[in-house]
Image: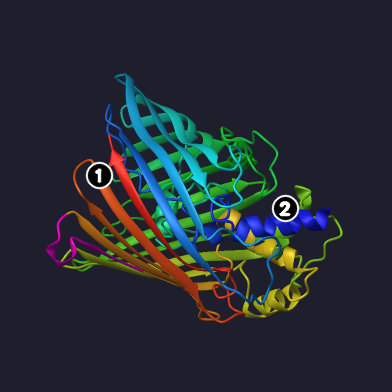
Amino acid sequence: MMKRAVILFAFAGTVLPVAAQENNDLNLIPGTVQNAPDQPIAAPGHGKYFLENAVGWYSLRGRLAVPVGGTLPSRWANRTSFDGLDQWTLAPDLTVTASDRLSLSFADGISFPKESLRNDVREAYLTWEAMPQTFLEAGRINARYGTAYGYNPTDYFRARTSVAQSSADPSSARLNRLGTVMLRGQHFFDGGAVEVLYAPKLHAPVAMGGLAGPLDPKIDQTNGADRALAAFSFEVEDFSPQMLVYYESGRTKFGLNLSHPIGASVIAYASWSGGEAPSAIVDAIAFGKRTRTLPSFVPLLPATSLSRSFKNDLSAGAYWTGEDKVTLSVEYNFHEAGLSRQEWRGWFANGADPSLAPLMWYLRGYASDQQQPMSRHQAFVRADWSEPFHIEHSDVGAFVMSDLIDGSSLGQISLSYDISDLWSVGVYGGGSWGGRKSEWGSLQSASSVIFQIARYF
């Protein structure tokens, strides 16, 4: 029974088109109708509401180096959502902010209503301006940190927050996700800001792959541990540094975000985080045992050290803005706890054994759930073109994320057009490619095309 449960999780967490909303590593594969346009900041008393429909078709790889158990996922899926973001002023110094999405999905093998109906409360919090430039907030808040586009090492509250979206762009996932229940205090001064927050443990961590009820706010995912953070931002000539200290479950991490303009059209940036930690393999298996998804006798595979050491995470890149509304970002990502070349070989070697394949996919699922890179080295390139060929109200975007160890990649091209102030249409086309024994080439989902239409209110 335990083996069957692990196999089912591996399937749901890696290839199921609609239900796998927790699995960000594989959500990056264009293979789910999980659309969410970037959410704007609502002005007081003025929100954004829209109804959208997204339908997608998917192609699958036939022969995998590491087999995935269960039945084949659907080759089509459809999702209809009502999305809202608003802010209300209750008093001159008191506001309330809310962001929510109600979705109904259909695909082969999706049961109604437990799997097809989903309400995601992304944010719901009060803001009180206790004194000029000093704010106290309480509720479910999206606390985002970092300057990078592909991977932000200092974005400490990203784990287990994935929300339905069709765009595979990591920046879109960062903007559209579940917030964390917390208390936050911020003080702004001339040239800088100080921020302190505390997110309490409200529920024991829940196992990955479970089917939450339609109205479940997933507090057991976002508030499964006591966490605290302090941040200090300031200006030093043309630099904009931010220093952070983060604490969670006995571990302390230090972070630094930097940005610096180079000439009139280039901004260089970097985000770094470091602290004592084990490898991603050790973390994943420990989590599986703690949540009773994996039995206590599961071996540590691929073989790795059990000891903790100081681990570094780094994203460094540059953002260029051209004259014709073209932007380009190029970025290098380093995740020291991720799999090395030797550990990837072990992943494929162990996964060739059908009895160990579910465990290997569990490791991939855990990295996705935590929204951490699976591999140690990767590159990220993204390009955007607003009003291409002078076509007003249109946008073109593309990105490629590549594993620098094996050369495999994930990519997407997106097109959008605003028909009017009330209607917009878009299409996402993408896929993953690489050898059978590569990070992106080993996945069951190969490519997809997703069409969407939105009506704004």
- Dot 2 and dot 1 residues touching (CB under 8 Å): no
User: On the image, which quarter does residue 439 sit in?
Assistant: bottom right
Question: Which residue is disc 2 drawn over?
Answer: 287
**Mark 2–mark 1 distance (CA, rounded to whole Å):** 44 Å
Q: Which amino acid does label 1 sit on?
A: Trp
Give the residue furthest to the top.
91
Please give the range of residues in magenta.
Answer: 382-392
Tally of numbered discs: 2
* Labels 2, 1: front one: 1
The answer to whether residue 264 is magenta is no
Give the structural element (helix, strand or loop) at label 2: helix
Give the residue furthest to the right.
297
Give the structural element (helix, strand or loop) at label 1: strand
Q: Nearer the viewer, residue 36 or 299?
A: 36
Which residue is at 40% across, 53% downward? Answer: 172
Which residue is at 78% across, 53% downward? Answer: 289
